[in-house]
Amino acid sequence: MAADIDLHLGKRLRRRRRLLGLTQQQVAVRIGVRFQQIQKYECGANRVSAARLWELAEALESPVSYFYEGLTEALERREGAGGEVFSRKETLDLIQAYYQLGERPRRRLLDLAKSLHSDEAAA
């Protein structure tokens, strides 16, 4: 979940910066970091501390709450779409193996998976 929050904050940071017509370098200078740090914040690679978020809000002339707007809805959408399930290696391996099968074996495997699910729900 932390990664989802970091991604959301990064998107909001990028949106606000662009709305103001600022470059990453200009924002970086305003808060005393290198532009690479702004890049990492924007893509969610680095977490934004509370103190740094305050500085960013000041530099971008917005309230701190701006960065959290829409977060609940974004997390709900992500969870509804399978969220962490699709980020698991096991899931990706299964999908790759599935699509390496021919059409008939794929259909049979899908039917098997559905029957196992309905058997589990009945138990």
Image (cartoon, rainbow, N blue to C red):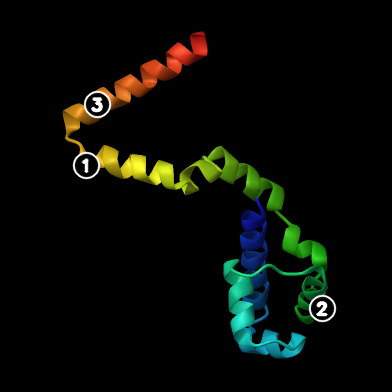
Which residue carries the number 3 mark?
107
**39 w.r.t. 90: above or below:** below
Determine if residue 52 is in view: yes
Question: What is the crowding at mark 1: few (fewer than 14 residues within 10 Å), some, or many (at least 20)?
Answer: few
Residue 121, percent from left and from top: 51, 14
Looking at marks 1 and 2 on the same chain, the residue that comes earlier in the sequence is marked by 2
Q: Tell me the amino acid under the disc marked 2.
A: Glu
Query: Going by the image, does 68 lie left or right of 21?
Result: right
- Label 1 with label 2: CB-CB less than 8 Å: no
Residue 100 circle label: 1
Please tell me whether mark 2 sits on a helix, a strand or a loop: helix
For mark 2, does the 10 Å Cα neighbourhood hold few (<14), some (14 to 19), or many (20 or more) residues?
A: some
Q: CA distance from mark 1 to mark 2?
A: 52 Å
Disc 3/disc 1 C-alpha distance (Å): 12 Å
Give residue 32's quadrant in the image. Answer: bottom right
Q: Looking at the picture, which amino acid does disc 1 mark?
A: Gln
Residue drawn at the location 32% of the way across and 20% of the way down: 112
Mark toward the viewer: 3 or 1: 1
Mark before the other along the chain sequence, 3 or 2: 2
119 vs 98: above or below: above
Residue 23 visible within the image? no
Q: Position of residue 75 (x, y in %)?
A: 64, 47
Mark 3–mark 2 Cα distance, whole angstroms, equals: 56 Å
The type of residue carrying mark 3 is Arg
Location of residue 119 in the rendering, given as x and y in whole percent from the top left corner: 44, 12
- The quadrant in which residue 47 appears is bottom right
> On the picture, is 35 further left or further right than 63?
left
Q: Secondary structure at mark 3?
A: helix
- Name the spot of residue 86 as percent of width and height, x first: 47, 44
Which residue was labeled with disc 2?
58
- Sort mark 3 into few (<14), some (14-19) or many (20+) by Cα contacts within 10 Å: few
